[in-house]
Image: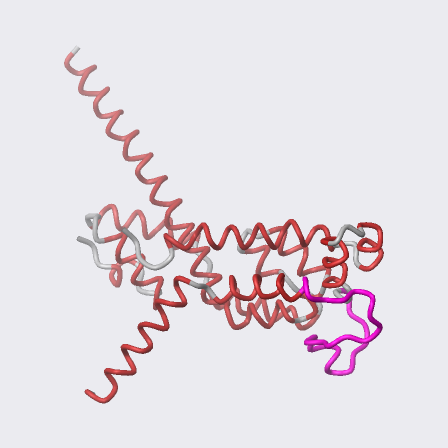
Amino acid sequence: MANVLKHLPELEGMELGYIQGILKNMDDEQAGLFAQVYRARRKDNQMVLILALLGFFGFAGLHRFVLGQIGLGILYFFTLGLCWIGTIVDLVNYKSLAYEYNIKVAHETLSMMSYSAENFTNNNDNKTKTDEA
Amino acid sequence: MASFSCFDRQMDSIRKIQAKLPFELLCWISALVGIMFIDPHSAHHFTLCPLSLAGIDWCPGCGLGRSMKLFAIGEFKASFQMHPLGAFAWVIIPYRIFDIIKQLKTRLNYG
């Protein structure tokens, strides 16, 4: 069982609990790999906050683009963040926006890791077979 | 310490409600419901818009709500003239609502 505070000490709140739930099934080596990939891909909620604040100066919706919601990003950009209302809502809500994105990233990372683990075991099987032959 | 434990429990239940019923989902649904109550042909209307309350008369998003209402009652040409993104918003916002609902079950805890 790996400890989230050892591998990803920068997490906090709901995200910390969620990632701990993922890491508790891993040994330290797997958790290290997961942490490396996850840290490179997750978005910090402070960046979402700052990009959302830019909405007050005419550049609304940049945070939606960064979080992969292109349609909403276009809608926000061309309507000044739904006349500021959307921007204000997202300023209240920026933490759950980042949390939602990071959960998706964590699931992606997990599925990639299980895929590469399968390949690894397959390769090992092949190697033992060729050794026997 | 003991006196704070009841607040802890309240905060916990608030957090659980938040996880089941996200703030953003409530906002989008109430926005769509509000839009259906707009009368697009009236000259003056009640406004929540912070820009217009601050005395700024024009913004690029003005008319989006009326445009969406016109689109919903079938006046497509008038809708496009009011704001070209009305139909686009009808695609994007319901898609976002659907997306949030889809994520509800993975939201609170892993496993």
> How far from the left and from the top, in percent, is residue B66?
76, 63
> Compared to B28, does A116 lie above or below?
above
How has the structure been colored for display?
Answer: secondary structure
Q: Quadrant of residue B2?
A: bottom left
Numbered disc total: 0
> Compared to A90, does B75 lie above or below?
above
Q: Quadrant of residue A77?
A: bottom right
Magenta segment, prevailing SS (helix, strand or loop): loop
Q: Residue at x 68, y 64 (%)?
A: B35
Q: Quadrant of residue A117?
A: top left
The magenta stretch is B35-60
Q: Residue at x 77, y 57 (%)?
A: B70
Q: Residue at x 35, y 65 (%)?
A: A14
> How far from the left and from the top, in percent, is residue B26?
52, 65
A12 vs B2, nearest the viewer? B2
Residue B81 on the magenta span: no
Q: Answer with left or right where residue A119 lies relative to residue A58.
A: left
Residue at the extreme left: A132
> Compared to A105, does B38 lie above or below?
below
Q: Answer with left or right where residue B27 lies relative to residue B89.
A: left
A99 vs B100, nearest the viewer? B100
- Tell me the quadrant of the picture where the C terminus of chain A can be found: top left
Q: Residue at x 46, y 53 (%)?
A: B101
Q: Answer with left or right where residue A5 lies relative to residue B99.
A: left
